[in-house]
Image (cartoon, coloured by chain):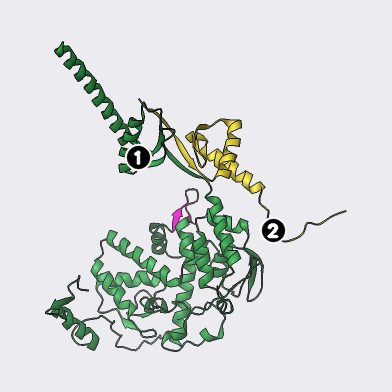
């Protein structure tokens, strides 16, 4: 904070910058004109939904999952709006297929799916910021709005009256992702959902994903909202997932061979083929392992280590299998005239840092594509120098005669 | 003064290198055999080598069959 000049050193005491101090006090006590914590709407909402919090959670989950479903390719209820699809393409999570103008998920998209919800939401918001810059929206106002979002209260509606035009645009865009809820486009108020209020907190952003009793009645103060794990992994590579969410089943299908599905559970196996397919799609072994770890059933979490080591090591081994052979393009330098030449050129190439392999006994080494141009120039210069040196000595000899 | 050859440097473990030397007997793509873990080959055949290597390793892995094969008499 001292680098930002918010805190300054004054004879051994830390002093807060005066302007910052005043505004901070204003924001905390609610005085002055500001909307750091959102302006609650003054009028009562006639269409306020019953059981607001549960409704908002439902809405947020539906919206967010429909986006993720669209990415995975499962047939879901609604395709997301064009703005969302544009953002998906811009962030590199999906790419446009040339043959039928549809979007197809990319490697980065697969990795995105395995991350937890908070990370996903933030990734989206950061992409949105980049997009906003391209659209020439005022970044400061957008950022202002984001920070305000993080401190809003779940279940309280806020008015859009005080927002600037840019921020009103942001409200509309965020409603598409499920971070905010508006009854219709022209409504003057918006409700933040759990996805928005947990932007800056560590608790889980989505409830109601798992049929566990503790998450059915969320109390205000979201301490109970910890994401329950649901995966059990055995040492014989069999996997049991206690979930009925199509999204999670689709994500599991990415790296696991699902065998059968029941009302509240799916079971399958982690096989060499299923992991190979995931690796071909760009998912790394680390991501699979951390996904399994973070969604492990509480029963699994009681034992240490959480996941069976045999399976973990085998997944890593399967990944290393793919990397047995490494190919790098380059140029081989051989048949040097003498050892000194070899040493000289090798030393030059090493200072450039372009040597891939060298062998002093055989007097040869390999240089990268990039480095080749420079090394060749160096050699040609030396040849020219040597020629010049030779002609010079020749001249001097004739003179001496 | 110096001979420069353009190609691809393959780095691998000694086992895989022997496999590559074997493949070379049929197709002749190795420019220079550097040491136990490095080979210098022509750029055009890298994909083919990778594919043949994968096929060979696949042949030699044991896969767990979830259901025993039916013996139909």
Q: Identify the residue position indicated by label 1 in the image.
A: A370
A96 magenta-colored: yes
Chain coloured green in this rendering: A
Q: Which mark is residue A11?
A: none
The kind of secondary structure the magenta stretch mainly shows is loop
Camera-side residue: B12 or A20? Answer: B12
B32 magenta-colored: no
Label 1, label 2: how many angstroms apart (C-alpha)? Answer: 45 Å
Residue bounds of the magenta highlight: A93-103
Q: Is residue A77 visible?
A: no
Quarter of the figure with the N terminus of chain B:
top left
Camera-side residue: A81 or A246? Answer: A246
- Give coordinates of residue A131: x percent, y percent: 32, 61
Chain for numbered disc 2: B
Q: Which mark is residue B64?
A: 2
Q: Residue furthest front?
A: A400
- Give coordinates of residue A305: x percent, y percent: 55, 73
């Amino acid at each position: 904070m001292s680098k930002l000049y918010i805190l300054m050193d004054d004879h051994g005491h830390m002093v807060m910058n005066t302007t910052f101090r005043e505004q901070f006090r204003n924001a905390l006590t609610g005085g002055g004109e500001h909307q750091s914590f959102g302006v609650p709407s003054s009028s009562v909402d006639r269409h306020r939904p019953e059981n607001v919090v549960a409704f908002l959670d439902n809405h947020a989950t539906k919206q967010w999952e429909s986006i993720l479903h669209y990415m995975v390719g499962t047939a879901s209820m609604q395709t997301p709006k064009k703005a969302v699809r544009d953002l998906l393409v811009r962030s590199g999570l999906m790419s446009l297929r040339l043959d039928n103008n549809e979007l197809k998920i990319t490697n980065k998209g697969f990795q995105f799916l395995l991350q937890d919800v908070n990370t996903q939401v933030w990734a989206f918001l950061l992409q949105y910021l980049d997009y906003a810059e391209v659209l020439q929206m005022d970044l400061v106002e957008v950022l202002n709005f984001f920070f305000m979002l993080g401190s809003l209260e779940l279940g309280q509606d806020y008015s859009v009256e005080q927002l600037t035009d840019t921020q009103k645009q942001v409200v509309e865009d965020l409603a598409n992702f499920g971070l905010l809820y508006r009854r219709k486009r022209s409504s003057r108020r918006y409700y933040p959902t759990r996805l928005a209020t947990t932007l800056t907190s560590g608790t889980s952003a989505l409830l109601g994903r798992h049929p566990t009793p503790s998450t059915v009645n969320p109390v205000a103060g979201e301490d109970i909202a910890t994401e329950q794990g649901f995966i059990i992994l055995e040492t014989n590579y069999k996997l049991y997932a206690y979930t009925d969410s199509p999204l999670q089943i689709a994500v599991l299908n990415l790296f696991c061979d699902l065998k059968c599905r029941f009302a509240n559970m799916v079971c399958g196996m982690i096989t060499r083929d299923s992991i190979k397919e995931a690796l071909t799609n760009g998912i790394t072994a680390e991501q699979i392992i951390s996904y399994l770890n973070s969604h492990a059933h509480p029963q699994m979490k009681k034992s240490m280590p959480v996941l069976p080591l045999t399976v973990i090591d085998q997944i890593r081994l399967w990944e290393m299998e793919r990397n047995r052979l490494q190919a790098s393009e380059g140029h081989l330098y051989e048949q040097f005239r003498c050892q000194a030449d070899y040493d000289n050129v090798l030393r030059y190439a090493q200072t450039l840092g372009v040597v891939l392999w060298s062998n002093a006994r055989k007097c040869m080494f390999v240089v990268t594509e990039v480095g080749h141009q420079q090394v060749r120039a160096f050699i040609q210069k030396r040849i020219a120098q040597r020629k010049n040196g030779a002609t010079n000595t020749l001249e001097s000899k004739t003179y001496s005669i | 003064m110096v001979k420069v050859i353009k190609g691809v440097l393959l780095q691998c473990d000694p086992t895989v290198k022997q496999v590559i030397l074997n493949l070379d007997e049929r197709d002749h793509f190795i420019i220079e055999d550097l040491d136990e873990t490095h080979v210098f080959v022509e750029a055009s055949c890298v994909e083919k080598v990778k594919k043949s290597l994968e096929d060979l390793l696949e042949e030699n892995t044991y896969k767990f069959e979830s259901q025993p094969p039916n013996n139909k008499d």
